[in-house]
Image: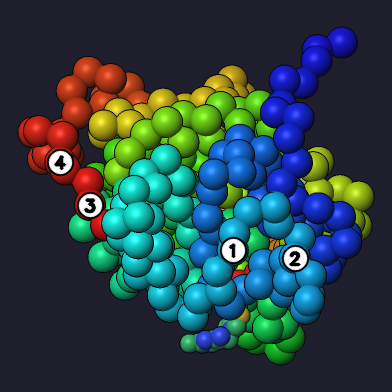
Amino acid sequence: MAKLTLPAQELMFSGHSACPGCGAALAMRLLLKGLGPRTVVSVPACCWTVIATPYPTTALGVAMMDNPIEATGASISGIRAALDAMGEKDVTVVGFAGDGGTADIGIQALSGMLERRTNALYVMYDNEAYMNTGVQRSGETPLGAWTTTTPVEGHEHGKIEAKKDMMAIVLAHHPVYAATLNPSFPEDFERKVEKAKAMSGPRFFDIFAPCSTGWRFDAQKTIAIGRLATDTGVFPLYEVENGRYHVTRKVGSLKPVEEYLHAQGRFRHLTPANIAAVGAQVRDGWEKLLTFESESLVAPTPSAAPTAPPATRA
Ligand SMILES: Cc1ncc(C[n+]2csc(CCOP(=O)(O)OP(=O)(O)O)c2C)c(N)n1
Ligand SMILES: [Mg+2]
């Protein structure tokens, strides 16, 4: 049997207040395993502020700062500047924010941090809705999904808009490294964490974070749902470095998207026609990704990256 090769160190402790089967809790645990104790995490209002610090305790073995939901990018810029002024250059500065706090409410501060080339890692853990406040839709909620603000009753059929492509938005800022990660593939996850840790400059992770409460599935199924997300093409695993795409889990033939959708109550209302529409969108995204990979191997777009490596600053 294959043996996992994950770092043994634990910087997230039991006794936290995540729901059973929380994908975002797995994301933090795996992230800190790879980053190690010389890490500072800044967390905006989201599930993770509640998970980490039921007063007067903390679930994290590293320093954590609470910041306003719109300010994660600004917060990590300030922490980086302070640490640099103190000569603590080897500390990894991490913003760890939800999808609502990243793709919607905090997108301005994220853009500023990337554009100023802040030397920090911004993590969006993507549970595809505003979960902490009661499962409201976000820009990351996928097409067709039920949320409390995209109901399924009368003439309403879940979210009618597509998921916002945060990787594309981030890549338009030419970060030194950006990747998608999924706790269901822990070795791929750790490899990306170790790679990002060794780099300097603006970095971004989009981490898939299944939410048994909001997605309506049995809490024991988190890992299985995560695997289905990647193997159906719903959440492909890839990384982009210097404008070059690399798909890190090649899926020869995608599993039918139904397998992923039928495993979750939030998609229960979808008709065969709705499912076909989701499937078409997923296949289109997957094919585009493969094209980006093959084209960027040959010639990255001339405008894609600055010609000289830019200086990094806070
Ligand atoms: C400016 C502002 N608007 C709204 C809120 C209320 N609020 C707190 S947490 C939260 C949900 C955040 O969603 P997301 O970032 O996806 O994180 P999740 O709860 O899903 O972990 C909201 C809307 C707030 N704290 N500040
Ligand atoms: Mg969320």
Q: Which residue is mark 4?
A: 310
Q: Quarter containing ligand 2?
A: bottom right
Q: Does residue 158 show up?
A: no
- Closest to the camera, between mark 4 and mark 2, is 2
Which residue is at a point 30% across and 44% down the rendered structure image?
Answer: 201
Give the Cα distance between marks 3 and 2: 30 Å
Give the Cα distance between marks 3 and 4: 9 Å
Question: Disc 3 on helix, strand or loop?
Answer: loop
Give the Cα distance between marks 2 and 1: 9 Å
Q: Is residue 10 above or below residue 47?
A: above
**Chain-order first, disc 2 or disc 1:** 2
**Chain-order first, disc 3 or disc 2:** 2
Which residue is at a point 60% across and 39% down the rendered structure image?
Answer: 36
Question: Disc 2 on helix, strand or loop?
Answer: loop
Under mark 4, the amino acid is Pro
Q: Which residue is mark 2?
A: 58
- Closest to the camera, between mark 3 and mark 4, is 3
**Chain-order first, disc 3 or disc 1:** 1
Asked if disc 3 and disc 2 are in contact, CB closer than 8 Å, the reply is: no
Q: Quadrant of residue 98?
A: bottom right
Which residue is at a point 81% across and 12% down the rendered structure image?
Answer: 2
Which residue is at a point 8% across and 33% down the rendered structure image?
Answer: 307
Is disc 4's CB within 8 Å of ligand 1?
no
Asked if disc 2 and disc 1 are in contact, CB closer than 8 Å, the reply is: yes
Give the Cα distance between marks 4 and 2: 37 Å
Question: Disc 1 on helix, strand or loop?
Answer: strand
Q: Which residue is mark 3?
A: 313
Residue 97 or 92: which is nearer the viewer?
A: 92
Q: Residue 64 — which label?
A: 1
Residue 166, given in percent of the width and then of the height, sits at: 41, 56
Residue 69 or 23: which is nearer the viewer?
A: 69
